[in-house]
Amino acid sequence: MTHRRGLLFWASAAAGWGLILWGVRGALHHHIDTRPAELTRFFIGGAVIHDVIFAPVVLGVGVLIARLVPGRWRAPVQAALLISGCAALFAWPEVRDYARVNHNPTSLPHNYTANLLVVVLAVWLATALVAVVAHRRGTS
Amino acid sequence: MRPPELLTTDPQLPLRQHRFQSPLRDERLAAWLGAALGVLFATCFVTGLFSHLHQHPLPWLPVPSRPAGLYRFTQGLHIAAGIASVPVLVAKLWVVWPRFLAFPPFRNVADIVERAGLAALVGGGVFMVFTGVANIAQWYPWHFSFTASHYAVAWITIGAIVAHLGAKWAITRRALARHRPALHEADPTLGTVAEAVHDGLTRRGFLGAVAAASGVLTVSTIGQTLPGLAPLALLAPRDPRVGPQGRPVNRSAANAGVIARATSPNWTLTVDGQVAHPLHFTLAELLALPSHEAALPIACVEGWSYSARWSGVRLRDLLEMAGAAPDAAAHVESLERNSIYRVSFVDHFQAHDRDTLLATHLDGQPLALDHGYPLRLIGPDRPGVNQTKWVTQVVVT
């Protein structure tokens, strides 16, 4: 970030910060609904949890894959982990079934643990299939 | 101690390096992921504004009632784009994460401005995606209002994107425009070795995996609004085929606390406000009025929807019977007592649409209690939360 900044940088910074302040103003104006102190904790907390916990854990998994998985299988394992990890991340509140406190049987009507396993299994099978086909093409 | 010498596949660097450099953490990949995230977040922002306008109507900007399925499309798109952005956001933050450790973090005022904008971008991006995903799963690990907070932070996030766009415009254009030869083409000897050392996903493979992750999430959830794909919607929080009368609901009669009043023989509908003749109907009197049928979607703000046949009395017929003005709008009120959606505003376009009904039947059957028995509002191009259930009063304005 040491290169010189031109007009575009400062103009978009001014416009962007105008919008940011508009959002902050809205949050403060509707403080009974937004509870600014708690909102700030979630806003900052999300970034901190990502940068300090989530990202280093993902990096650690990446290092483990690089060390443990043979080069030929590394790419498909990385791809399958990325896809199934994202599915698990998304499905986490469904698997935990936090919505049961709302007593609405039409909300989260499925067995999401079983469904997530089906999705993850399908992802790994499809990735393995793609890897085998690509490997055969590469060696033929 | 001198660190071990390693080979790198980053074409920005000499092929021999003294530190590890993942071939995936480069500006071209960051630019592609940033562009994808920009499109997804902009889609969410525009469709979110449309939804906000529906729920917080502006007197000078009435929302037309046609096309009837517009809100179903825009809100389905809002949720689908938000879900698809989960892998893109995670991947983008992974690619640029080492910059988080850059030292010193800033050298001049412009660096401080850019860093502060990045903090807003990361905080806002994570907040929007996390609260959105939690909300559609009806998980509320907070005490603030989801809609008010999601809306306020949307402005913060879109502002941070605008600032970031200006800061990265030149780099992004350069990164996306330039063709990069594979390393074994650039340097057959060293390049081939470097590629072998970093065996794993290539840049193209990484982008493909991120796209596949977004695709898997989309395919496994979009069936909550596209009925043909419902059997594949393994991770969708709703199934448009599951619920009373084979349809889901967002709020049950038990949760709304209306069962006794909705099933009472003393239930009546009142039409009053700015009318020449206030009206009162029992359910039997209402059922004796001319009935009309309309095929209309229920489109929840949480992204699920279904289309059904509704029948009942036209709102515009009731307004005419009561002697309301030709451009009258109305507030439709529910038996609910403690809900922010107890009253629904129907602007003059929607109030006079031929398909805006106070419905008594769903798919030919009397409404189930959870669907709003004895009477619910249903109109074209409206969010589900504004299709008020357990209606008891129409106040003409």
Image (cartoon, coloured by chain):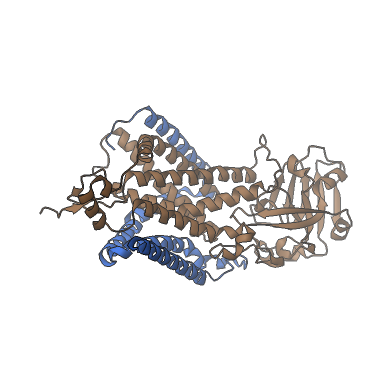
Chain colours: A blue, B brown
Asked whether, in this view, residue A109 is left or right of residue B245, the answer is left
Q: Is residue B232 above or below residue B273?
A: below
Return the x and y of residue B255 as percentages of the image width and height. Answer: 65, 64
Q: Residue B143 versus residue B71: which sits nearer the camera?
A: B71
Q: Quadrant of the C terminus of chain B?
A: top right
Asked whether, in this view, residue A18 is left or right of residue A106, the answer is left
Return the x and y of residue B114 as percentages of the image width and height. Answer: 35, 38
Q: Residue B209 versus residue B102: which sits nearer the camera?
A: B209
Q: Residue at the spot x=45%, y=54% of the render?
A: B211
Asked whether, in this view, residue B161 is left or right of residue B290, the answer is left
Q: Is residue A109 above or below residue B347?
A: below
Q: Quadrant of the N terminus of chain B?
A: bottom left
Q: Residue furthest left?
A: B1
Q: How many marks?
A: 0
Residue B360 figure quarter: bottom right
Q: Residue B293 versus residue B379: which sits nearer the camera?
A: B293
Q: Residue furthest top?
A: A7
Q: Residue B178 versus residue B389: which sits nearer the camera?
A: B178
Q: Residue at the spot x=78%, y=51% of the render?
A: B357
Residue B205 figure quarter: bottom left
Residue B305 visible in the shown view: yes
Residue A41 visible in the shown view: no
Q: Residue at the spot x=15%, y=53% of the render?
A: B5
Return the x and y of residue B202 as percentages of the image width and height. Answer: 33, 54
